[in-house]
Amino acid sequence: MATINPMFSRIRSAILKIPRGKVSSYGAIAKAAGFPRAARQVVRALNQSHGLPWHRVVAAGGRIALPGEHGLDQRFRWKWKGSSSVAGKCG
């Protein structure tokens, strides 16, 4: 049985607190989870987790950092679900 990484668990919880219609940055999620310098770990947690609203997490300044089709998919989901503003806080 796989051990759940406590850091990833806190990151997942912070991602789930992003309200519908809002987005938050990788850095803001890391800070909300208690790891202010771990934005790259947010990316890793998203890659290893299923069922999270990954399209609500963006790069600094609200920019889409995903390449290719994933970036297009994220932009489509924003428009379809009405996401347009960056959440100041997670939670």
Image (cartoon, grey):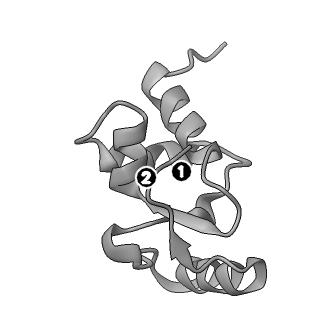
Q: Residue at x 53, y 75 (%)?
A: 85
Going by the numbered disc 2, the residue's amino acid type is: Val
As drawn, the label of residue 43 is 2
Q: Secondary structure at mark 1?
A: helix
Foreground residue, 59 or 83?
Answer: 83
Going by the numbered disc 1, the residue's amino acid type is: Asn
| 46 w.r.t. 3: above or below | below
Q: Secondary structure at mark 2?
A: helix
x then y, percent, for residue 18? 60, 53
Q: Residue at x 56, y 19 (%)?
A: 4
The reply to whether discs 2 and 1 touch (Cβ–Cβ < 8 Å) is: yes
Q: How many marks?
A: 2
| 72 w.r.t. 61: above or below | below
Left-right relation of 43 to 27: right
Left-right relation of 79 to 89: right
Left-right relation of 67 to 84: left
Q: Residues within 10 Å of mark 1 (few under 14, many from 20)?
A: few
x then y, percent, for residue 38? 29, 42
x then y, percent, for residue 42? 42, 46
Q: Rounded to the nearest whole Å, what is the CA distance between mark 2 and mark 1?
A: 6 Å
Looking at the rendered image, the quarter that the C terminus falls into is top right
Looking at the rendered image, the quarter that the N terminus falls into is top right
As drawn, the label of residue 55 is none
Foreground residue, 42 or 18?
Answer: 18
Q: Residue at x 48, y 20 (%)?
A: 6
Residue, far left? 37
| 88 w.r.t. 1: above or below | below
As drawn, the label of residue 47 is 1
Q: Residues within 10 Å of mark 2 (few under 14, many from 20)?
A: some
x then y, percent, for residue 41? 37, 43
Q: Could you say which quadrant of the image residue 58 lies in?
A: bottom left
Q: Residue at x 46, y 51 (%)?
A: 89
